[in-house]
Image: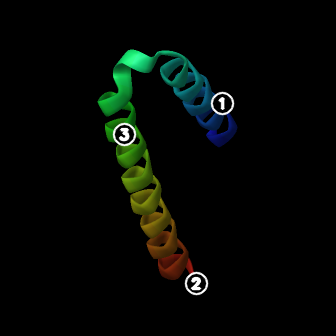
Amino acid sequence: MLRYLKIGIEVVLCHIYSSEKLQRWKLNLVALIIVLLFQSAGNVKMWVRSRS
């Protein structure tokens, strides 16, 4: 599941970076992805803590 998500993100990013018109949109998307990654990392830590 995670692997497919990663591949999907890579495909989307490649598609975006091939189009130069979407400069601002690119930055917003990258920021969003980073925020989501940090949030999911926090959720994983909480989950691991609650399991142990």
Decide which of 19, 7 is in the foreground and name it.
19
What's the CA distance linking mark 2 and mark 3? 38 Å
Q: Which residue is mark 1?
A: 7
Image quadrant containing the C terminus: bottom right
The image quarter in which residue 29 lies: top left
What's the CA distance linking mark 1 and mark 2? 31 Å
Relative to residue 19, is residue 48 depicted above or below? below
In the rendered structure, which disc, 1 or 3, sits on the residue that comes first in sequence?
1
Question: Taking 33 as reference, is 6 left or right?
Answer: right
Q: Which residue is mark 2?
A: 52
Q: Amino acid at mark 1?
A: Ile
Question: Taking 38 as reference, is 12 left or right?
Answer: right
Relative to residue 47, is residue 7 depicted above or below? above
Decide which of 26, 2 is in the foreground and name it.
26
Tag 1 near tag 2, CB within 8 Å: no
Tell me where residue 36 appears, x and y as whole percent: 40, 51
SS at mark 3 in the image = helix
Decide which of 8, 16 is in the foreground and name it.
16
What's the CA distance linking mark 1 and mark 3? 19 Å
Question: Hey, which residue is sitting farthest right in the picture?
Answer: 3
Q: Residues within 10 Å of mark 2 (few under 14, many from 20)?
A: few
Tell me where residue 34 appears, x and y as whole percent: 43, 52
